[in-house]
Amino acid sequence: MLLSCENSIKEVQSITSNEKAPERSGKNVEFIFTDSTRIKSRAFALEFLEVKTEDSEYQDFPKGGRITSYDKDGSIAGQIEANYAKHLISDQLWELRNKVVAISDDGKNINTELMFWDQGKGLIYSDQYVRITTDDGQVLEGIGFSSDDKMNKITLKKVTGEVYLNDETEQ
């Protein structure tokens, strides 16, 4: 029996290449991000894959997880949960997808289907539908937002919703 093949060496190498295979993987993992021994944030995930390609290095969290950030005094500054996350290591950028919920230390909730967290710039943002619930129950909706990562300075784009104002005029 005689068999022949018409694949080039490059085709064979691309099929057998480990370029996209995970370097590391794990289940039920916790990552702690520090700066000068101070914990800045923690990430928890059910599943973790670290992938290195010629173009980039990233951490993939296909089953989602939770990121908790901390103030300088160690108190919780905010938390973000999502059903999928990807961390672009060199860019210090998190991509969070599918039922993303961000909660600030003062009780604001941001709900969206896509959110980015730029750790280097201290910025969270999205260009998708977003629903913001304040600590006093007000609901604002819009398409797109940006904020500092503590959610103190939120800019909502294409706003809809109801806002209730207290009339504190003297009688």
Image (spheres, helix red, strand yellow):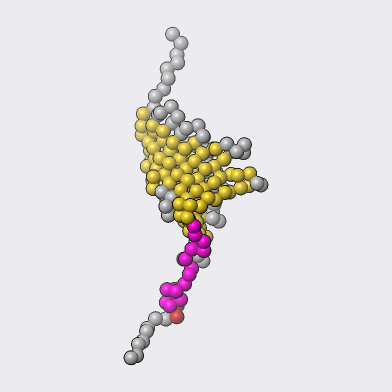
Residue plotted at (37% across, 42% down)? 129
Residue found farthest to the front: 28
Residue 78, x across and y down, in percent:
51, 39
> Closest to the observer: 38 or 122?
38
Identify the residue shown where x is 51% and y is 66%. Answer: 54
| Residue appearing at x 48%, y 68% in the figure | 19
Evaluate whether residue 35 shows in this view: yes
Q: Nearer the viewer, residue 64 or 104?
A: 64
Tell which of 25 and 89 is nearer to you. Answer: 25
- Residue 98 belongs to the span the image colors magenta: no
Q: Which residues are magenta?
A: 11-26
Quadrant into which the C terminus falls:
top left
Res. 93 visible in picture:
no
Seen in the picture, residue 169 relative to 156 is either above or below; the reply is above
Residue 39, quarter of picture: top right
Q: Residue furthest top?
A: 171
- Residue situated furthest left in the rendering: 1
Residue positioned 51% across, 34% down in the render: 105
Q: How many marks?
A: 0
Q: Position of residue 30 (x, y in %)?
A: 53, 50
Where in the figure is residue 21, as x and y percent of width and height? 47, 66
- Is 139 above or below relative to 117? above
- The residue furthest bottom is 1
Q: Is residue 17 magenta?
A: yes
Instruction: Classify the position of the N terminus by image quarter.
Output: bottom left
